[in-house]
Amino acid sequence: MAQPRARDLGIRIGTGDPGPGNAITDVAGVRVGHRTVKRGDDGAPDAVRTGVTAIFPGAADPWNEPVYAATHILNGYGELIGVNTIREWGILESPIVLTSSLQIGKAYDAAVAWIAARDPRAGEDVMPCVTECDDSWLSAVLTRPLADEDVWAALDDAKPGPVGEGCVGAGTGMQCFDFKGGIGTASRVVPGASGGYAVGALVLTNHGDRENLLIDGVRVGEALGDLMPDEHSEGSCVVVVATDAPLLPHQLRRVAERAGMGLARGGSHASNGSGEQLLAFSTANAVPRHGGSFSPTAIADGGEAGTIVSAIFRATVEATEEAVVNALFAAHTTVGRDGHTLHALPVDRTLAALRNAGRLS
């Protein structure tokens, strides 16, 4: 049974209103799929706790209708395949695939094959976007646990609507502030005066020091000093931000940067040994794949239009912050290889700390 999400329990992060599903899929056309891979008994040396998550940046095949996109690397001890193409051309022309650090080669190769099976020309031309976090604390990564079929299953599973959170897909083996982490998502709808645009964030959490954990500004981590793993890892985090606002690549780079502010509001300081890969895209303009002129819609950066961009920035920060909290609330205690254990966030004690601070509605 799914855990109640943060907002269901009275936690109200920021001042903005979420979309109907409070998820990245509130941006029309965006689809998310998961493949969870679990093998071996709890504690076995070869236990596997890993998976794949796929995000499609629109209802159409992205190799036929690429969208504007941008990236920001907050701390670069991680890998984002496709970063150079996105930076150089300003477009995203494939699904975004999230997985385990040492499986990104497998995920890339499988994504190429999946695209080629649907469009051989695209299979020859498109370089898929693949990024990662390290799940080696719980998962026997050197067994090379992913198969092509696992990547294909995540891609085939992609759909609009509710998004699985916590220990699913790429989040199966991840930690967050020394608790069990994983996938989280949230959204905001900017006020009508600022265009009424939707902004959604999906996070793959694998980051944070317990004592720094903040939820809605409350130092929850300081009150939860037990349930610690035997070892601490600096970890990483991937944030994918989607919007239907007609933003250009340079504006989307600025949106991606604001996702880092959302992580900071939750207590992340992007430590030296972590990899924060931040990516933003807009579904508003379909870019001709094979050239030719077109007339994109856009929002100006300055003047009165600048207030719209600012509203999108705020929405990005809030959605990212809440997505991390949703990942924590959704995750459950997981035992992986060699008895390594990540405990779930103790929800009752967390709510008590927030209640004592006057932060529950």
Image (tube, rainbow, N blue to C red):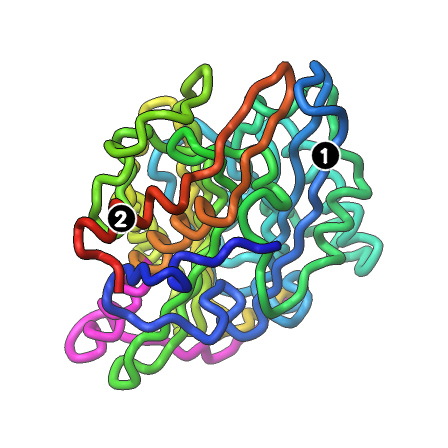
Nearest to the observer: residue 126 or residue 279: 279
Q: Tag 1: Cα neighbours inside 10 Å, few (<14), some, or many (≥20)?
A: some
Q: Is residue 298 magenta?
A: yes
Q: Which residue matches tag 1? A: 38
- Residue drawn at point x = 71 percent, y = 23 percent: 47
* Amino acid type indicated by mark 2: Met
- Residue drawn at point x = 63 percent, y = 72 percent: 59
Q: At which x and y percent is residue 101? A: 58, 29
Q: Secondary structure at mark 1?
A: strand
Q: Is residue 49 magenta?
A: no
Magenta span: 290-316
Q: Which residue matches tag 2? A: 261
In this rendering, does residue 305 appear at all?
yes
Residue 195: give its label. none
Q: Quadrant of residue 170?
A: top right
Reply above or below: 207 against 247.
above
Nearest to the observer: residue 136 or residue 105: 136
* Amino acid type indicated by mark 1: Lys
Q: At which x and y percent is residue 163? A: 58, 60
Q: Quadrant of residue 144?
A: top right
Q: At which x and y percent is residue 274? A: 40, 28
User: Going from the N terminus, do you reach mark 1 or mark 2 first?
Assistant: 1
Q: Quadrant of residue 77?
A: top left
Q: How many marks?
A: 2
Q: Secondary structure at mark 2?
A: helix
